[in-house]
């Protein structure tokens, strides 16, 4: 007789797919967003760039503010409820984007999409509260690959659908995908033995962190997440221009840039579960430190490459280092935060992640303008160096306890 699958494993499979769809939904429209905006009015170049920047950043700005609020709601009412609200809200907002007639309507819907961005953080919180501690590293690392895979394939699917059926159909299909996530979460994700935190017992943020056994670890991981995301995204504004420079203005810049941009995600997708397993055996913080050191070593030579294939190899190695970073941060959060407050803790971390998404491109654009494309990679390596010291300082107490 076939053994019954543990409930946390079933939840992991369904939530992996949910994260895949959410990650894909964030990136699906990126290849053509500026072109879609262009169809909504008559804009000069400056106006088009301004509206594109507003529409791109609106979701992340609101998400960084809303994530802790959804986390508090989840700890009081359940993570599954937040995931259902999030999936339904994002689905409606995304489908509505296919109906807009003016650019301000699109910007407003992108703001509202950020309002409902509570799905991913609460999948991590739910799995962290259910998985046996000896499997937490592998489980959370595997869960994170769902979002990575979705963000990796999103631009590819979005461009293909828009090319075949038009921009507006892409929004409708994405809304339908979110509806599928809602149904699967409703019927196949189970949150048993949930103990709600009453409104009277809900601690303010300062008191919450004081109550933790290792508050410096938790707060340290928030800062680590922000720096990791800022470093990763600082490259985004210049990667295609850097590829164009390495190709000496040759053909196929768009295709080659897409491949270069996708390589880190491909590497992370396959390496993350492996690092999660190793972290469960030898210590998650050791994997995190090793990943940061490796990341610094592969960022520096990217500033000095002379052809595209060298850049491609190094970007693939960046993906391997990424697999040892954010998934390990989430594992440390799971291990050193109480279950009753895991929703808030993971939501604070997601807020830090969104802030990194905002600051990273700003850093990259500023540095590239002042010091050239190579300067972006060197400044990112410097950020990673700061992060190495920060992680060492944040985790030295748990290292001392285990010694």
Image: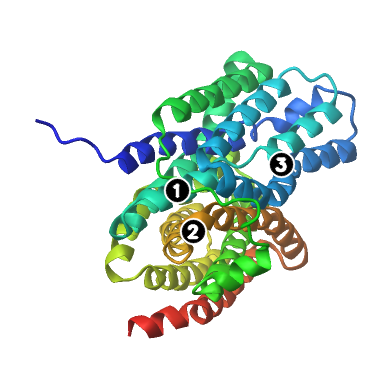
For residue 144, which numbered disc appears in the image? 1
Of all residues, the one furthest to the left in this rendering is 1
Alpha carbon of mark 3 to alpha carbon of mark 2: how far?
Answer: 21 Å
The residue under label 2 is 326
Counting residues from the N terminus, which is met first, the one under dot 3 or under dot 2?
3
Tell which of 341 and 137 is nearer to you: 341
- Crowding around mark 3 (Cα neighbors within 10 Å: few <14, some 14 to 19, many 20+) is many
Alpha carbon of mark 2 to alpha carbon of mark 1: how far?
Answer: 8 Å
User: In this rendering, does residue 380 appear at all?
Assistant: no
Q: Measured along the vertical axis of the image, is residue 305 above or below residue 238?
A: below
Residue 47 drawn at (x, y percent): 89, 37
Counting residues from the N terminus, which is met first, the one under dot 2 or under dot 1?
1
Tell which of 133 and 96 is nearer to you: 133
What is the quadrant of residue 252 in the picture? top right
Q: Measured along the vertical axis of the image, is residue 347 above or below residue 382?
A: above
For residue 59, which numbered disc appears in the image? 3
Residue at 50% of width from left, 74% of height from top?
214
User: In this rendering, does residue 280 appear at all?
Assistant: yes
Residue at 45% of width from left, 67% of height from top?
336
Residue 62 drawn at (x, y percent): 74, 45
- Crowding around mark 1 (Cα neighbors within 10 Å: few <14, some 14 to 19, many 20+) is many
Alpha carbon of mark 3 to alpha carbon of mark 1: how far?
Answer: 20 Å
Tell which of 322 and 318 is nearer to you: 322
* Dots 2, 1 in contact, CB < 8 A: yes
Determine whether the residue tagged by mark 2 lies in a helix, strand or loop.
helix
Counting residues from the N terminus, which is met first, the one under dot 3 or under dot 1?
3
Tell which of 376 and 225 is nearer to you: 225
């Amino acid at each position: 007789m076939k053994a019954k699958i543990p409930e946390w494993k079933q939840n992991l499979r369904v939530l992996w797919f949910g994260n895949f769809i959410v990650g894909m939904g964030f990136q699906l429209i990126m290849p053509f967003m500026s072109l879609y905006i262009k169809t909504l009015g008559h804009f000069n170049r400056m106006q088009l760039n301004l509206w594109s920047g507003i529409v791109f950043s609106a979701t992340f700005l609101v998400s960084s503010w809303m994530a802790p609020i959804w986390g508090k709601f989840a700890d009081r009412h359940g993570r599954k409820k937040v995931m259902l609200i999030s999936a339904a809200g994002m689905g409606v907002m995304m489908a509505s984007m296919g109906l807009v007639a003016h650019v301000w309507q699109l910007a407003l819907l992108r703001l509202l999409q950020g309002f409902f961005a509570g799905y991913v953080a609460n999948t991590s919180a739910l799995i962290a509260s259910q998985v046996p501690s000896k499997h937490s590293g592998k489980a959370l690392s595997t869960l994170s690959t769902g979002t990575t895979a979705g963000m990796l394939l999103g631009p590819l699917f979005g461009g293909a659908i828009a090319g075949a059926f038009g921009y507006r159909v892409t929004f409708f299909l994405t809304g339908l995908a979110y509806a599928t996530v809602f149904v699967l979460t409703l019927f196949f994700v189970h949150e048993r033995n949930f103990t709600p935190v009453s409104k009277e017992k809900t601690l303010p943020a300062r008191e919450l962190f004081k109550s933790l056994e290792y508050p410096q670890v938790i707060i340290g991981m928030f800062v680590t997440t922000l720096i990791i995301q800022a470093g990763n995204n600082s490259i985004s504004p210049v990667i295609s221009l850097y590829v164009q420079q390495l190709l000496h203005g040759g053909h196929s810049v768009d295709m080659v840039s897409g491949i270069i941009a996708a390589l880190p995600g491909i590497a992370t997708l396959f390496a993350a579960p492996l690092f999660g397993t190793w972290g469960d055996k030898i210590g998650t913080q050791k994997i995190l430190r090793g990943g940061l050191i490796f990341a610094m070593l592969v960022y520096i030579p990217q500033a000095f490459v002379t052809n595209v294939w060298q850049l491609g190899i190094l970007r693939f190695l960046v993906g391997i280092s990424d697999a040892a970073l954010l998934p390990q941060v989430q594992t440390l959060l799971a291990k050193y935060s109480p279950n009753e407050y895991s929703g808030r803790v993971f939501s604070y971390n997601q807020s830090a992640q969104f802030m990194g998404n905002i600051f990273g491109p700003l850093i990259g654009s500023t540095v590239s303008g002042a010091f050239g494309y190579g300067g972006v990679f060197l400044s990112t390596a410097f950020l990673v160096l700061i992060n190495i010291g920060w992680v060492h300082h944040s985790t030295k107490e748990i290292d001392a306890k285990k010694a």
